[in-house]
Image (cartoon, rainbow, N blue to C red):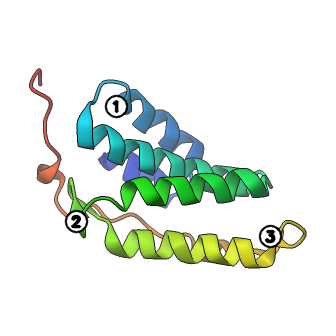
Amino acid sequence: MEEAVCLFNEGLFFEVHEVLEAVWLKEEGQVRLLLQGLIQIAAGFHHLENNNFKGALSLLKEGREKAGEFGAVCFGLEMDRFLEKVKACYDSIEALGRDAFDRFDRRMIPQMRLLDPGAIPARPDR
């Protein structure tokens, strides 16, 4: 998770997707759902960078909905504030519309905060 947080905060959204997907494939239950939401959020911002309006909106919304099922801090990640900022990005992109979303202020993209790396549950085989 620490690597994914660093990559996300550097704006390397495709790489976040790759790192988290490798973990997601091995996980089950709630961890899997959280990872899927974070993957979708990263992919949404990747689509934004590639001028894919529909893909950006769709994945930001789906990812936020999945990741929003967890508490304020989940698996060491500060979720509430992060997801509020993802929603603000979504709202801004949607308001700009397909013809003007390239004017989205990318400084709005939130940073992820890993508050407690030890809170991430270890898999039994580790």
Q: Position of residue 122 (x, y in %)?
A: 13, 36
Left or right: where 53 falls relative to 41: right
Q: Mark number for residue 101? A: 3
Q: Quadrant of the C terminus?
A: top left
Secondary structure type for disc 1 = helix
Q: Amino acid at mark 1?
A: Val
Asked which secondary structure carries label 2, the reply is strand
Q: Position of residue 46 (x, y in %)?
A: 65, 50
Question: Which residue is more in the foreground, 106 or 65?
Answer: 65
Is disc 3 placed on a helix, strand or loop? Answer: helix
Residue depicted at 32% across the width and 59% down the height: 69
Q: Is residue 73 left or right of residue 17?
A: left
Q: Is residue 36 left or right of residue 114?
A: right
Where is mark 2, residue-wise? 73
35 or 58: which is nearer to us?
58
Q: Amino acid at mark 2?
A: Val
Q: Which mark is residue 23?
A: 1
N-terminal-most mark, 1 or 2: 1
- The amino acid on which the numbered mark 3 sits, given as a three-letter code, is Phe
Q: Nearer the viewer, residue 15 or 42?
A: 42
Residue drawn at 62 percent across, 56 percent down:
45
Q: CA distance from mark 1 to mark 2?
A: 20 Å
Residue 5: % across, % down: 38, 53
Disc 1 to disc 3, how far (Cα)? 32 Å
Residue 81 x, y percent position in the rendering: 37, 76
For the residue carrying disc 3, how many other residues have a C-alpha within 10 Å: few (<14), some (14-19), or many (20+)? some
Task: Tell me the quarter of the picture where residue 82 sits.
Answer: bottom left
Q: Earlier in the sequence, mark 3 or mark 2?
A: 2
Inter-mark Cα distance, 3 to 2: 31 Å
